[in-house]
């Protein structure tokens, strides 16, 4: 009875199983790291898209509701309507939109800010009233163009020019 043979794995079989398990674990870990990197890139891209579309939506809404757009300095503009005064400040790394005391920060890299002036007859309004703001937003070596346009009709221009007389 003492000579019963036990069936078990040999040490070489255990070492081969351990080596195969280690190889499979390292492949799984590399795949997990790659998936994590892709998820991080997706989150960054998604954040950019949300910021870009929200700013575009706000600028489109403001373009129809404001009466006048005035340049404070080369990077700051005031958008005035009957009920709202809104300020937009362009910095190289972000855009601030101050509307009724609430400040929204859009984390977008702004380059090439350009503005166009409305032709006015009154000297106080000359080179002050803005009809076009254009800028580029940079994301990972790609450039996205964004613009804000305000069309003034003759009646609103006359009202603005007679207010300061």
Image (cartoon, rainbow, N blue to C red):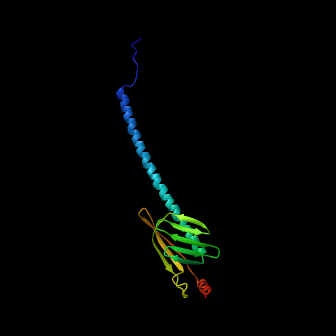
Image location of residue 116, percent across then percent down: 49, 79
Outermost residue toward the top? 1
Q: Is residue 123 left or right of residue 163?
A: left
Image location of residue 91, percent across then percent down: 48, 68
Q: Is residue 155 above or below residue 17?
A: below
Image location of residue 97, percent across then percent down: 56, 68
| Residue 141 sits in quarter | bottom left
Q: Tell me how many marks there are.
A: 0
Q: Quadrant of the C terminus?
A: bottom right
Image location of residue 61, percent across then percent down: 58, 70
Q: Is residue 59 left or right of residue 25?
A: right
Residue drawn 53% across and 79% down?
Answer: 130
Q: Is residue 126 above or below residue 35?
A: below
Is residue 114 or residue 29 the one in the foreground? 114
Q: Is residue 32 above or below residue 91?
A: above
Residue drawn 55% across and 70% down?
Answer: 59
Residue drawn 49% across and 77% down?
Answer: 115
Q: Is residue 3 above or below residue 72?
A: above
Residue drawn 52% across and 73% down?
Answer: 76
Q: Quadrant of the N terminus?
A: top left
Is residue 144 or residue 66 the one in the foreground? 66
Q: Is residue 129 left or right of residue 15?
A: right
| Residue 87 sits in quarter | bottom right
Outermost residue toward the left? 12
Outermost residue toward the right? 83
């Amino acid at each position: 009875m003492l000579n019963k043979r036990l069936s078990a794995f040999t040490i070489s079989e255990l070492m081969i199983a351990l080596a195969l398990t280690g190889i499979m674990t390292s492949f799984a870990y590399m795949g997990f790291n790659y998936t994590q990197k892709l998820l991080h890139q997706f989150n960054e891209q998604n954040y950019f898209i949300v910021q870009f579309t929200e700013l575009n939506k706000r600028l489109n809404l403001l373009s129809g509701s404001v009466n006048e757009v005035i340049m404070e300095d080369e990077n700051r503009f005031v958008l005035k309507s009957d009920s709202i005064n809104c300020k937009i400040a362009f910095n190289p790394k972000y855009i601030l939109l101050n509307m009724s005391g609430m400040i929204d920060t859009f984390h977008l890299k702004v380059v090439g800010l350009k503005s166009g002036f409305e032709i006015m007859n009154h000297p106080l309004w000359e080179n002050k009233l803005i009809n076009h703001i254009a800028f580029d937003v940079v994301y990972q070596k790609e450039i996205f163009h964004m613009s804000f346009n305000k069309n003034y009709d003759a009646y609103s221009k006359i009202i603005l020019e007679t207010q300061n007389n």
